[in-house]
Image (cartoon, grey):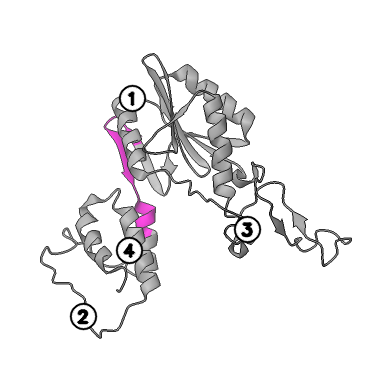
Amino acid sequence: MAKGYTQTYGIDYSETFSLVAKIDTIRVLFSIGENKNWSLHQFDVKNVFLHEDLKEEVHMEAPPGFSEDFQRNEVCKLEKTLYGLKQSPRAWFRRFTVAMKRYEYKQNNSDHTLFLKRKGDLITCLIIYVDDMIITGSDIEEISQLKNNLFREFEMKDLGGLKYFLGIEVIRSNKGIFISQRKYIMDLLAETGMVDCKPIDTPMQVNHGLKFEEGANLADKERYQRLVGKLIYLSHTRPDIAYAVGVISQFMHQP
């Protein structure tokens, strides 16, 4: 683990990249997979940020106990990325993209974490979120070949059929795909001390009357923003709270 917070822009890092799949893309993939009766496979890449060589020149202090012969005025020059470095996510995604293009996959223009490959009427889809990926499609042979290629390229773990992804529980039955964030909700209620509160069908009245009040004491801004952010993520599987979350989001800068 490197102390990435000590890095200086333009000196030991330049561009960064957040390797985050869009939740809307994932929902669409679930919908198509269910309607086409595609299987959904999940994989995990081990030590994801240790795979790529560094393009920049980065030096760091030797970790404690590295070597008895190491002098105090000496530093390490990194050859490969480490966890904590600001450029590690970008470097990992660069290598992964190169591998996927070598397998003749194309990146989706609206979501760069989605890769597609067509063979006639058959299609194979892969979406990746840092070290978690989902593979689905109608080309069973190509899916099997892609698995073999990725396992040769990276150290990976086959998690089997998709059950849990990005805090979202995925349940498949003969009635379709059901996505739920029950554990996420229970953790959020526990964090706010509201586990024993009574539920209500309508979370907020339409004419709520909420407004800024001059001279009022501010709430804990950091905690407010963190909780609203969690509720925004929750609204992906609970659209019934979307209106209430939209209202409280209006006060993020000055709660």
Q: Is residue 213 above or below residue 69?
A: below
Q: Locate the N terminus and report the quarter of the image it occupies.
A: bottom right
**102 relative to 222 in the view: left or right:** right
Q: CA distance from mark 2 to mark 4?
A: 20 Å
Counting labels gives 4
* Residue on which disc 4 sits: 228
Q: Which one is earlier in the sequence, the residue at label 2 or at label 4?
A: 2
Looking at the rendered structure, the kind of residue marked 3 is Ile
Q: Locate the C terminus and report the quarter of the image it occupies.
A: bottom left
Looking at the rendered structure, the kind of residue marked 1 is Asn
* Residue on which disc 3 sits: 11
The dot on residue 37 is 1
Q: Which one is earlier in the sequence, the residue at label 4 or at label 1?
A: 1
Q: Which one is earlier in the sequence, the residue at label 3 or at label 2?
A: 3
Q: CA distance from mark 3 to mark 4?
A: 35 Å
Q: Which one is earlier in the sequence, the residue at label 3 or at label 4?
A: 3
The dot on residue 116 is none
Q: Which residue reaches farthest bottom?
A: 215
Looking at the rendered structure, the kind of residue marked 4 is Val
Residue 2, image x, y percentages:
65, 58
Residue 138, image x, y percentages:
39, 21
Neighbours of disc 1 within 10 Å: few (<14), some (14-19), many (20+): few
Can you tell which of label 2 and label 1 is closer to the viewer? 2
* Residue on which disc 2 sits: 213
Q: CA distance from mark 4 to mark 1?
A: 36 Å
The magenta region covers 172-186
Q: Quadrant of residue 95?
A: top right
Q: Is residue 158 above or below residue 84?
A: above
Do callouts 3 and 2 mark residues in contact (Cβ within 8 Å)? no
Q: Is residue 182 magenta?
A: yes
Residue 99, image x, y percentages:
57, 30
Can you tell which of label 3 and label 4 is closer to the viewer? 3
